[in-house]
Image (cartoon, rainbow, N blue to C red):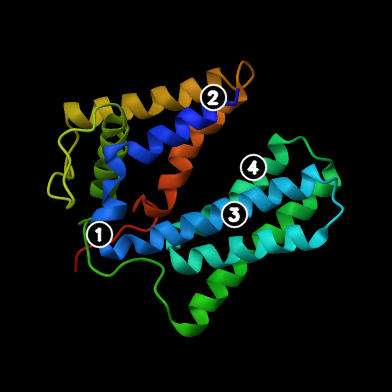
Amino acid sequence: DEAVPFFSFFLFLVHPVNTEVIAWVSQQGTLVSTMLVLASIALFLLYFKLNYRYRFILYSSLLLSAIAPFVKEQLIIAPFIMIGLAFYLQLSIKNKIEILLMYSSTILINVLTRLYFGVAFSQDGGIFANQKEALLTMAHGFAYYIRLIYFPWPLTVNYEGFPFERSISVTVLVSFFVIFGFIFLGYYFRQRDPKITLGVYWFFVGLLPVNNVVTPLYTT
């Protein structure tokens, strides 16, 4: 079992699809926020491994999880990682409720802080003309990133090759088929191997903050 996470880490480390984080100076926040979230997860697991004896470990994890989305907006999903772990570790109902309330509060703090200081929740500039265009494009985009995981070519530090879609096409239909295929795959393994289910679904969870479907960046 120890070989699986080591191989996964090494693959993530050397996979060319991650070059954007290094190639763009503006992506330094990704490295910092990732470090914060990984440290938060480590402390979270350590707290329960030590049988809940040191509350300051849990509070430290909570603090790092709260800071992460201020560094990188996409990490607003960080609290859901801890909530998911609480259910995956089969904690008691009391502990699940406690984790749910504590880590959910960090999302509220982030939202209220942004509202108070007038900080935007998304990047400036329009991309899509309407909701339909956003949905079709992001469906193709999700499938595009799935393909890059297995066939990372061609790659570019920019987004010239990002697939914008304005109407239903064979490519869009295939993209939807691929996405729902992976969702079914995760459901299929939910009892046979929950780790596979977690890995498959977390790929989509990680893309939710930047899916541009719920709140598309419309052109003016």
Q: Considering depth in this image, is 111 or 62 the residue closer to the camera?
A: 62
Q: Which residue is mark 4?
A: 84
Type of amino acid at the residue the image marks with label 1:
Trp
Find numbered disc 4 in the image and state the secondary structure of the residue it sits on: helix
Q: Quadrant of residue 122?
A: bottom left
Q: Which residue is mark 3?
A: 39
Type of amino acid at the residue the image marks with label 3:
Ala
Type of amino acid at the residue the image marks with label 4:
Gly
Where 76 falls versus 3 (above or below)?
Answer: below
Find numbered disc 3 in the image and state the secondary structure of the residue it sits on: helix
Residue name at image x 47 percent, y 20 percent = 185
Q: Which residue is mark 1?
A: 24
* Residue 98 on image: x %, y %: 79, 54
Between circles 4 and 3, the one closer to the viewer is 3
* Mark-to-mark CA distance, 4 and 3: 16 Å
Q: Which residue is mark 2?
A: 3
Which of the two discs, 1 and 4, labels the residue nearer the N terminus? 1
* Mark-to-mark CA distance, 1 and 4: 31 Å
Between circles 2 and 4, the one closer to the viewer is 2
- Dot 2: few (<14), some (14–19), or many (≥20) neighbours within 10 Å? few
Residue name at image x 74 percent, y 53 percent = 99
Which of the two discs, 3 and 2, labels the residue nearer the N terminus? 2
- Dot 3: few (<14), some (14–19), or many (≥20) neighbours within 10 Å? some
* Residue 200 on image: x %, y %: 48, 30
